[in-house]
């Protein structure tokens, strides 16, 4: 059986970031590796990342950039395969990249450079990749050399495959058009592994109250703000859309938001607004408040917040505002409390929060503790990174950790 053409040492489900890195890491050790991808193309999420430039990693990687029911789980893998290890491979392949805000690294040319690098590494060590493969069944077997038997359909042709190690790198529920699915969770449940509740992460907010038409009118406007929810804060750009709010700062805070939670926005995070308004009242008393705010905020946004917070004083000069009223407006600008009705969901979410419970997984090898030869890597696990290259870092690190032992 060991030498049969349908037998592999390692079969990896999913030809995304974690699956491909795991594949060539294992094959470098002399393992016979097959990667099965259900889509027609490999690495779709890599190609769309960073607007086609692939934010493939971050210079600054710490465990607190990741969300998990067990915040310590990610540490071993991040140490075993760091950002510097991946950057070294990128440089070795001559891929030009640039640093943007907050240590984010992007390809200068195209995300294809990263995917081609991974595929080249796979090709060099004989990794076999099959696309358009639908998994219909996984069975645990008794023999150590053939622990798992897989029934697969490729282009409607049935395949029966066997392997010693099975790696689940199927991704999660986010962006189903790029291949997101829940098959990894189904395999976990089949082998009695617990799941942590899942929800869309790194995802825009929607509104059903009076904010909906305001967002529609401001659609396309971006500004740097500070956003807080559940004691977590981020300072980045907010983008108004015709559906609600997006932009990096909203995607970041969405990982901490649950339905019913308030989100607090500081529209002028670099200013002591109360002090500034009182000083302006003394020095520019004849000015309109709207005119003053136009110096620091987009006119369209100032018009909207005026309608919300001081419509009755729209034509009044600053001297006509009581100090109490100015303090009220300053508080609103610095602590605008909003309540999203929902997120846009998995359709546009960059990641899925939750997943396979890490309590049942070895943090060193990514192997299921009670199921020899079964491994879970990447987004299918209950480890979610912040925006900025951290989810790719988890893919590389977890893929490498499994690749060393499968």
Image (cartoon, helix red, strand yellow):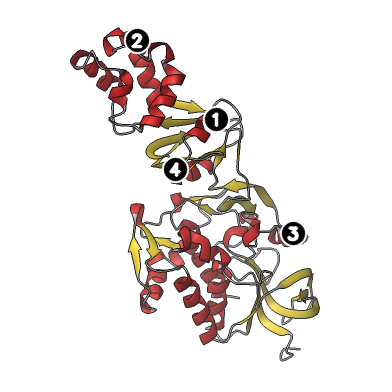
The first of marks 1 and 2 along the sequence is 1
The first of marks 3 and 4 along the sequence is 3
For the residue labelled by badge 2, is the local secondary structure a helix, a strand or a loop? helix
The first of marks 1 and 4 along the sequence is 1
Asked whether the viewer can see residue 406, the reply is: yes
Residue 165, given in percent of the width and then of the height, sits at 67, 75
Whether pointer 1 and pointer 4 mark residues with C-beta atoms closer than 8 Å, the reply is no
Image quadrant where residue 186 sits: bottom right
Q: Is residue 75 left or right of residue 184?
A: left
The first of marks 2 and 4 along the sequence is 4
Frontmost of labels 3 and 1 is 1
Q: Would you place residue 153 above or below residue 65 in this image? A: below
* Residue found at x 54% / y 67%: 17
The first of marks 2 and 3 along the sequence is 3
Mark 3, residue position:
186
Mark 2, residue position:
324
* Residue found at x 70% / y 73%: 132
* Residue found at x 38% / y 12%: 313
Q: CA distance from mark 1 to mark 4?
A: 21 Å
For the residue labelled by badge 4, is the local secondary structure a helix, a strand or a loop? helix
Mark 1, residue position:
213
Frontmost of labels 1 and 4 is 1
Q: CA distance from mark 2 to mark 3?
A: 58 Å
**Which mark, residue 249?**
4
For the residue labelled by badge 3, is the local secondary structure a helix, a strand or a loop? helix
Q: Is residue 290 left or right of residue 260?
A: left
* Residue found at x 45% / y 46%: 248
Q: CA distance from mark 2 to mark 4?
A: 31 Å
């Amino acid at each position: 059986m060991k030498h049969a053409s349908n037998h592999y040492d390692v079969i990896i489900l999913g030809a995304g970031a974690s699956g491909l890195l795991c594949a060539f890491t294992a094959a470098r050790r002399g393992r016979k590796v097959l990667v099965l991808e259900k889509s027609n193309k490999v690495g779709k999420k890599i190609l769309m990342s960073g607007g086609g430039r692939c934010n493939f990693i971050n210079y600054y990687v710490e465990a607190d950039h990741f969300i998990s029911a067990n915040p310590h789980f990610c540490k071993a893998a991040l140490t075993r395969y760091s950002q510097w290890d991946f950057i070294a491979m990128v440089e070795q392949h001559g891929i030009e990249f640039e640093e943007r805000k907050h240590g984010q690294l992007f390809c200068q040319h195209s995300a294809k450079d990263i995917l081609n690098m991974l595929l080249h590494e796979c090709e060099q060590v004989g990794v076999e990749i099959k696309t358009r493969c639908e998994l219909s069944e996984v069975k645990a077997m008794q023999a150590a050399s053939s622990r798992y038997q897989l029934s697969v359909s490729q282009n409607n042709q049935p395949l029966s495959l066997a392997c010693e190690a099975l790696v689940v790198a199927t991704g999660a529920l986010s962006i189903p058009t790029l291949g997101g699915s829940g098959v990894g969770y189904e395999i976990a449940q089949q082998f009695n592994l617990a799941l942590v509740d899942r929800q869309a992460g790194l995802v825009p907010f929607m509104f059903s109250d009076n904010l909906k038409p305001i967002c529609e009118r401001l659609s396309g406007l971006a500004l740097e703000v500070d956003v807080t929810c559940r004691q977590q804060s981020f300072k980045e750009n907010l983008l108004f859309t015709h559906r609600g709010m997006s932009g990096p700062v909203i995607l970041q805070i969405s990982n901490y938001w649950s339905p019913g939670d308030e989100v607090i926005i500081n529209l002028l995070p670099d200013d002591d607004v109360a002090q500034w308004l009182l000083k302006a009242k003394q020095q520019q008393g004849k000015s309109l408040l709207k005119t003053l705010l136009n110096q620091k905020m987009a006119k369209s946004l100032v018009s909207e917040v005026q309608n919300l917070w001081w419509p009755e004083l729209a034509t009044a000069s600053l001297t006509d505002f009581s100090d109490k009223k100015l303090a009220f407006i300053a508080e609103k600008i610095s602590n605008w409390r909003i309540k999203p009705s929902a997120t846009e969901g998995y359709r546009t979410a960059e990641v899925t929060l939750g997943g396979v419970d890490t309590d049942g997984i070895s943090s060193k090898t990514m192997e299921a503790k009670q199921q020899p030869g079964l491994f879970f890597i990447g987004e299918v696990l209950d480890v979610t990174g912040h925006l900025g290259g951290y989810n790719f870092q988890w893919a590389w690190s977890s893929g490498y950790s499994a690749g060393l032992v499968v």
